[in-house]
Image (cartoon, helix red, strand yellow):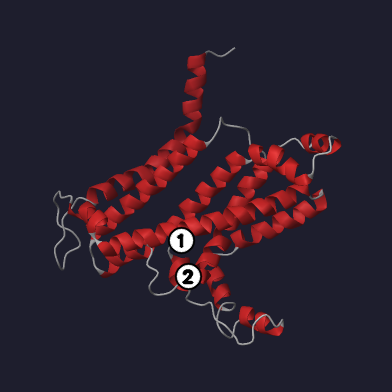
Amino acid sequence: MSRPGESRLSAWLVMAPALCLTIAGFGIPAFYMARMSFNEHEPQTAFVPGFTFENYHRLVSDPLILTVIWNTARLALLASVATVALAYAFALLVWLRPGRWRIIFVGLALLPMLVSEIATIFGWWTIFPKNGLLSYALVSTGLVQDRISLMYTESAALVGLVYVTLPYCFFILLSVFDGLDRRTLEAASDLGAPPWITFAEIIAPQTRIGLLAAFAQAFIWTMGAYATPLALGPDTLWTLGYFIQDQMLSKHHWPMAAALSMALTLGVSAMILVVRWLQPEQRSFHV
């Protein structure tokens, strides 16, 4: 029988390779980015070595930056709520279906993950314009009289973000559903509980942890999204991803770009801590 100290040592040895890769691939670059955020900036230069809080002061005082942060958080929140709702319904449907249907639905959920984000954007460009597939379908079915265009609108950016994040949330929630005991549903049915009571009293409480994890995944992904909002949204929809790129490459203001990146990193970390605090005790997930 192994001792507690030996068990902890074995756990650290198992985690050591992944921990070293995380430190090398994320920890060290994050440290340099944090240091860069305190440097100074002068015209025609990327940065001037120094130490100042001016960049962080701009984060809370510059109206343009505050608008960018608000646009990013609002879009991420809307996309996350929509993604979790769709993923939850889809995962519940797949969980209740027989095995042969499950394979088909899981295959459909995997399809978006097999295509790059850029290729997906090109696909939406054939759907959203005035002469695209969506406009043609709406006119053909008589739902609208004139052709419409969703291209370069906030709705298009929202749909694109939901499409990209939906598979990840689906598999998180499906793993949670697979951990439920189906016999509880049979017992509830035998006792005469209607479906909505079974869902509210049995399924929903046991899948709350999955909802929180899926929401965190969607929010983290959409907060840092760059290509999809830029390609599908309007020119006025500036997100943190675009603004960081603009400060880095167009304005050549590396300290400001680093400060924005640190604010984004800290915001995402705070979301993870909040979700972790709201979660009950850890339960096993099944794939």
Q: Nearer the viewer, residue 92 or 127?
A: 92
**At numbered mark 2, what does the secondary structure look like: helix, strand or loop?**
helix
Residue at 15%, 50% (x, y): give it. Answer: 52
Q: Which mark is residue 154?
A: 2
Give the residue type at disc 2: Glu
The N terminus: image quadrant = top right
Residue 72 in percent (x, y) is at 40, 60
The C terminus: image quadrant = top right
Task: Determine whether label 1 and label 2 are within 8 Å by CB.
Answer: yes
Chain-order first, disc 1 or disc 2: 1
User: Is 215 drawn above or below residue 247 in the view shown?
Assistant: above
Q: Work out whether residue 179 can be spotted.
A: no
Residue at 64%, 40% (x, y): give it. Answer: 207
Q: CA distance from mark 1 to mark 2?
A: 8 Å
Q: Work out whether residue 67 can be spotted.
A: yes
Q: Which residue matches tag 1?
A: 75
